[in-house]
Image: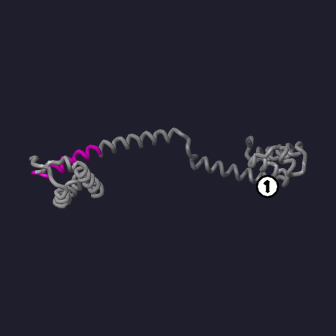
Amino acid sequence: MTIAQHPPQQDMASLYGEHHAWLLGWLRRRLGCAHHAADVAQDTFLRLLAASDKLPQLAEPRAFLTTTAKRLLVDRSRRHAIEQAYMLELEALAAQLPCYPSPEEILLAVQSLERIAGALEQLSTRARDAFLMHYLDGASHAAIAERLGVSTRMVHKYLVQALLRCDTALGQPCL
Protein backbone atom coordinates (compact mmCIF):
# COMPACT_ATOMS: atom_id res chain seq x y z
CA MET A 1 0.00 0.00 0.00
CA THR A 2 1.37 3.33 -0.96
CA ILE A 3 0.47 6.33 1.15
CA ALA A 4 -0.24 9.64 -0.56
CA GLN A 5 -2.38 12.44 0.85
CA HIS A 6 -5.63 12.26 2.91
CA PRO A 7 -8.71 11.65 0.75
CA PRO A 8 -11.78 13.88 0.90
CA GLN A 9 -15.13 12.37 2.06
CA GLN A 10 -16.35 11.72 -1.49
CA ASP A 11 -13.42 9.33 -1.99
CA MET A 12 -14.96 7.08 0.66
CA ALA A 13 -18.13 6.84 -1.43
CA SER A 14 -16.14 6.00 -4.53
CA LEU A 15 -14.08 3.44 -2.58
CA TYR A 16 -17.33 1.78 -1.52
CA GLY A 17 -18.85 1.94 -4.99
CA GLU A 18 -15.78 0.52 -6.72
CA HIS A 19 -14.80 -2.22 -4.26
CA HIS A 20 -17.85 -3.31 -2.23
CA ALA A 21 -18.96 -6.02 -4.69
CA TRP A 22 -15.41 -7.36 -4.95
CA LEU A 23 -14.98 -7.43 -1.13
CA LEU A 24 -18.37 -9.09 -0.71
CA GLY A 25 -17.42 -11.83 -3.20
CA TRP A 26 -14.04 -12.34 -1.55
CA LEU A 27 -15.66 -12.68 1.86
CA ARG A 28 -18.41 -14.96 0.52
CA ARG A 29 -15.81 -17.36 -0.85
CA ARG A 30 -13.85 -17.20 2.38
CA LEU A 31 -16.80 -17.61 4.76
CA GLY A 32 -19.13 -19.75 2.67
CA CYS A 33 -22.14 -17.69 3.80
CA ALA A 34 -23.55 -14.69 1.99
CA HIS A 35 -25.14 -13.26 5.13
CA HIS A 36 -21.95 -13.37 7.21
CA ALA A 37 -20.00 -12.00 4.25
CA ALA A 38 -22.40 -9.05 3.99
CA ASP A 39 -22.05 -8.36 7.71
CA VAL A 40 -18.25 -8.35 7.58
CA ALA A 41 -18.19 -6.24 4.41
CA GLN A 42 -20.45 -3.69 6.09
CA ASP A 43 -18.30 -3.72 9.23
CA THR A 44 -15.19 -3.22 7.08
CA PHE A 45 -16.56 -0.09 5.45
CA LEU A 46 -17.95 1.18 8.76
CA ARG A 47 -14.50 0.86 10.30
CA LEU A 48 -12.98 2.74 7.37
CA LEU A 49 -15.68 5.40 7.57
CA ALA A 50 -15.06 5.86 11.30
CA ALA A 51 -11.36 6.43 10.60
CA SER A 52 -11.81 8.27 7.29
CA ASP A 53 -10.18 11.46 8.56
CA LYS A 54 -7.04 9.46 9.39
CA LEU A 55 -6.96 7.33 6.23
CA PRO A 56 -4.26 7.98 3.69
CA GLN A 57 -4.86 7.96 -0.07
CA LEU A 58 -4.73 4.30 -1.01
CA ALA A 59 -2.73 3.13 -3.99
CA GLU A 60 -3.98 -0.45 -3.45
CA PRO A 61 -7.43 -0.18 -1.86
CA ARG A 62 -8.23 -3.89 -2.24
CA ALA A 63 -5.18 -4.87 -0.19
CA PHE A 64 -6.21 -2.37 2.48
CA LEU A 65 -9.82 -3.66 2.47
CA THR A 66 -8.58 -7.26 2.66
CA THR A 67 -6.34 -6.51 5.64
CA THR A 68 -9.15 -4.70 7.46
CA ALA A 69 -11.62 -7.51 6.71
CA LYS A 70 -9.13 -10.16 7.90
CA ARG A 71 -8.73 -8.31 11.19
CA LEU A 72 -12.50 -8.16 11.57
CA LEU A 73 -12.71 -11.90 10.86
CA VAL A 74 -10.17 -12.57 13.60
CA ASP A 75 -12.19 -10.39 16.01
CA ARG A 76 -15.37 -12.18 14.96
CA SER A 77 -13.74 -15.59 15.45
CA ARG A 78 -12.55 -14.65 18.94
CA ARG A 79 -15.98 -13.32 19.87
CA HIS A 80 -17.60 -16.50 18.54
CA ALA A 81 -15.22 -18.68 20.58
CA ILE A 82 -16.06 -16.72 23.74
CA GLU A 83 -19.80 -16.99 23.01
CA GLN A 84 -19.50 -20.75 22.44
CA ALA A 85 -17.57 -21.24 25.68
CA TYR A 86 -20.19 -19.19 27.53
CA MET A 87 -23.05 -21.18 26.00
CA LEU A 88 -21.37 -24.49 26.89
CA GLU A 89 -20.91 -23.29 30.45
CA LEU A 90 -24.57 -22.27 30.66
CA GLU A 91 -25.62 -25.63 29.24
CA ALA A 92 -23.52 -27.49 31.80
CA LEU A 93 -24.92 -25.35 34.59
CA ALA A 94 -28.49 -25.89 33.38
CA ALA A 95 -27.93 -29.65 33.32
CA GLN A 96 -26.89 -29.56 36.98
CA LEU A 97 -29.86 -27.52 38.18
CA PRO A 98 -33.28 -29.13 38.43
CA CYS A 99 -34.98 -26.10 36.87
CA TYR A 100 -37.69 -27.84 34.92
CA PRO A 101 -39.48 -31.08 35.68
CA SER A 102 -38.95 -33.95 33.31
CA PRO A 103 -41.92 -35.33 31.34
CA GLU A 104 -41.99 -38.30 33.72
CA GLU A 105 -42.18 -36.00 36.74
CA ILE A 106 -45.00 -34.03 35.14
CA LEU A 107 -46.92 -37.24 34.42
CA LEU A 108 -46.49 -38.44 38.01
CA ALA A 109 -47.69 -35.08 39.35
CA VAL A 110 -50.77 -35.11 37.11
CA GLN A 111 -51.60 -38.68 38.11
CA SER A 112 -51.21 -37.79 41.79
CA LEU A 113 -53.48 -34.77 41.39
CA GLU A 114 -56.08 -36.92 39.67
CA ARG A 115 -55.97 -39.38 42.59
CA ILE A 116 -56.30 -36.54 45.10
CA ALA A 117 -59.25 -35.10 43.16
CA GLY A 118 -60.90 -38.52 43.17
CA ALA A 119 -60.34 -38.86 46.91
CA LEU A 120 -61.77 -35.40 47.57
CA GLU A 121 -64.88 -36.21 45.52
CA GLN A 122 -65.66 -39.01 47.96
CA LEU A 123 -65.70 -36.57 50.91
CA SER A 124 -68.65 -34.59 52.19
CA THR A 125 -68.97 -31.07 50.80
CA ARG A 126 -67.90 -29.50 54.09
CA ALA A 127 -64.81 -31.72 54.45
CA ARG A 128 -63.80 -31.00 50.84
CA ASP A 129 -64.36 -27.25 51.30
CA ALA A 130 -62.37 -27.26 54.55
CA PHE A 131 -59.48 -29.05 52.81
CA LEU A 132 -59.47 -26.66 49.84
CA MET A 133 -59.77 -23.54 52.01
CA HIS A 134 -56.93 -24.66 54.26
CA TYR A 135 -54.45 -26.08 51.73
CA LEU A 136 -55.18 -23.94 48.68
CA ASP A 137 -56.33 -20.64 50.18
CA GLY A 138 -54.19 -20.88 53.32
CA ALA A 139 -57.15 -20.15 55.61
CA SER A 140 -56.79 -20.85 59.32
CA HIS A 141 -58.95 -23.35 61.20
CA ALA A 142 -60.85 -20.49 62.86
CA ALA A 143 -61.57 -18.77 59.53
CA ILE A 144 -62.78 -22.04 57.99
CA ALA A 145 -64.95 -22.75 61.04
CA GLU A 146 -66.56 -19.33 60.74
CA ARG A 147 -67.24 -19.74 57.00
CA LEU A 148 -68.66 -23.24 57.37
CA GLY A 149 -70.57 -22.48 60.59
CA VAL A 150 -68.87 -25.26 62.57
CA SER A 151 -66.40 -25.47 65.45
CA THR A 152 -62.64 -25.42 64.93
CA ARG A 153 -62.57 -28.96 66.32
CA MET A 154 -64.91 -30.05 63.50
CA VAL A 155 -62.63 -28.33 60.94
CA HIS A 156 -59.74 -30.35 62.37
CA LYS A 157 -61.77 -33.55 61.93
CA TYR A 158 -62.64 -32.62 58.35
CA LEU A 159 -58.97 -32.04 57.54
CA VAL A 160 -57.90 -35.33 59.13
CA GLN A 161 -60.63 -37.14 57.18
CA ALA A 162 -59.47 -35.52 53.90
CA LEU A 163 -55.81 -36.30 54.55
CA LEU A 164 -56.60 -39.93 55.31
CA ARG A 165 -58.49 -40.22 52.00
CA CYS A 166 -55.54 -38.65 50.14
CA ASP A 167 -53.17 -41.01 51.92
CA THR A 168 -55.22 -44.00 50.82
CA ALA A 169 -55.56 -42.71 47.25
CA LEU A 170 -51.82 -42.08 46.88
CA GLY A 171 -50.55 -44.96 48.92
CA GLN A 172 -48.34 -42.50 50.86
CA PRO A 173 -48.76 -39.49 53.15
CA CYS A 174 -50.57 -36.68 51.28
CA LEU A 175 -49.11 -33.50 52.74
Name the residue that disc number 1 marks: 121
Q: Is residue 113 left or right of residue 131?
A: left
Q: List x then y, in percent, for residue 106.
A: 61, 49
Q: Residue at x 67, y 51 (%)?
A: 111
Q: List x then y, in percent, for residue 10.
A: 18, 58
Q: Residue at x 40, y 41 (%)?
A: 86
Nearest the viewer among 52 and 115 is 52
Q: Residue at x 74, y 42 (%)?
A: 175
- The colour scheme used to paint the residues is one colour
Residue 22 appears anywhere in the view: no
Amino acid type at image mark 1: Glu
Q: Which residues are magenta?
A: 59-75
Q: List x then y, in percent, for residue 62.
A: 15, 52
Q: Toward which corner of the image does residue 34 lie, by quadrant? A: bottom left
Q: Main secondary structure of the magenta part?
A: helix
Disc 1 packing (10 Å; few <14; some 14–19; many ≥20): few
State whether residue 19 is above or below residue 165.
below
Nearest the viewer among 49 and 169 is 49
Badge 1 element: helix
Q: How many discs mark residues in the rendered view?
A: 1
